[in-house]
Image (spheres, helix red, strand yellow):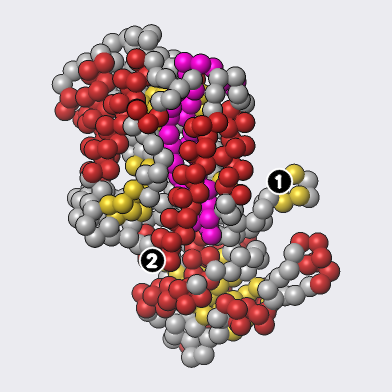
Amino acid sequence: MQAEYRQRREQLMSKIGNGTAIFRSAPTAVMHNDVEYAFRQDSDFYYLTGFNEPQAVAVLAPSHSEHRFVLFVQPKDREQEVWSGYRCGVEAAKQMYGADEAYPITELDEKLSQYLEKADRIYYHLGRDRTFNDTILNHWQHLMRTYPKRGTGPIAIEDTGPILHSMRLMKSQAELELMRKAAEIAVEAHNHAMKFTQPGRYEYEVQAEIEYIFRLRGALGPAYPSIVASGVNSCILHYIENDRQMQDKELLLIDAGCAYGYYNSDITRTFPVGGKFTPEQKTVYEIVLEAQKQAIAQVQPGNPYKQIHDTAVRVLTEGLVELGILKGEIDKLIEEEKYKPYYMHRTGHWLGLDVHDVGVYQHGDEKPQILQPGQVLTVEPGLYIVPDTKLAEDQPETDSRWVGIGIRIEDDVLVTTTGHEVLTAGVPKEVAQVER
């Protein structure tokens, strides 16, 4: 992978011209008292370096005569390493990660200026680390004060996101291999969960089986807190308590994916706990499934991204009208968003190093994001008939037989040169396949 990281850095440096880009590693986070959460590197930092330690800074300085890629890292410290694990150290940062130069992180303030003073701007994302934000701003202000003496220096700070995130949106073959593996593991976990689920078991038992397979197959673990939502819990979009006992004639909605090599999968399936849909559950399920199928069909190179959502919304709205849950003319219901009490989220998101991955969805009102080969996204329509739904104006009261039904179906989809590939197709979703 080092050749790939190098290629990414070169691509970014070709886009920033005479600028200097600075990236900060993720901070550590305290779980309780003096125990930390497992460290997860900042995705932008990892994308460019593959370096997986905290307290590090990467500098890309294409205009520097010798050091185009510089790493500031924690030095080797035997006493600290006994407690918290081995460190790469300064010398190995050059050998293992291809840095032209490396320094201890404690020398950042002293050394950083030499990589900024001839740059015409600083590329840096002003993030949540306010102390480091101040470090960058202080360097910039100092260089601006001394600008008249040199006639060189950064006259602006520009966010790295628009440039770097457009790169991350297009997945390489190496990235796709990791994403296929993440999908493969999650597919196995979901299929096992369907077989394991039965009335009387608890949601957390299903969660444990899913996450066991994640780790057993080499994943880092869940890509996000696993959602295992039975009964009315299926109407809560981000339900993660997973502590309810499942009953016959209820639905179970599982939204779970894993992280493999830092890349993520994201799958949702909804199925009957006892093996058979009730007539009402089946009717709503078939509407959502048809919406997903038609939305996935819109994943074609050259199509606007928003066409996926628009397609799903139309199918769902038509279905709600057929059920009598909504009334009115379809186009007007969509225009006035009368469907939103039952479908309140978008139909998907970009997927990659982050579960909700970076990348623009719309370039202003008049310029949509166009789908291109190499992009990976989720397609996840749903309907949630919440018991205490606040009805849209002029809409009928919901018949009690529909209340408490929550359904979402989600797959990970790659845009190909000729259309699309559903990476998670191995989890069944047809009614005949889901029932048992």
Quadrant placement of the C terminus: top left
Percent x, y for residue 325?
29, 15
Percent x, y for residue 435?
40, 25
151 over 121 or under it: above or below:
below
Residue drawn at (51%, 75%), measured in percent from left and top?
Answer: 2
Residue drawn at (44%, 85%), measured in percent from left and top?
Answer: 63
In the picture as drawn, the residue positioned furthest to the right comes out as 79
Q: Which residue is mark 1?
A: 31
Q: Which residue is mark 2?
A: 172
Give the magenta part as a residue range. 244-273
Under circle 1, the secondary element is strand
In reply to whether residue 192 is colored magenta, the answer given is: no
**Numbered badge on residue 115:** none
Amino acid carrying label 2: it is: Ser
Under circle 2, the secondary element is loop
Amino acid carrying label 1: it is: Met
**Distance of label 1 from label 2 (alpha carbons):** 35 Å
Does residue 137 appear to the left or right of 305 in the view shown?
right
Q: Nearer the viewer, residue 68 or 378?
A: 378
In the picture as drawn, the residue positioned furthest to the bottom comes out as 65
Percent x, y for residue 245?
60, 20
Q: Nearer the viewer, mark 1 or mark 2?
A: 2
Quarter residue 96 falls in: bottom right
Q: In the rendered image, is residue 34 in sight?
A: yes
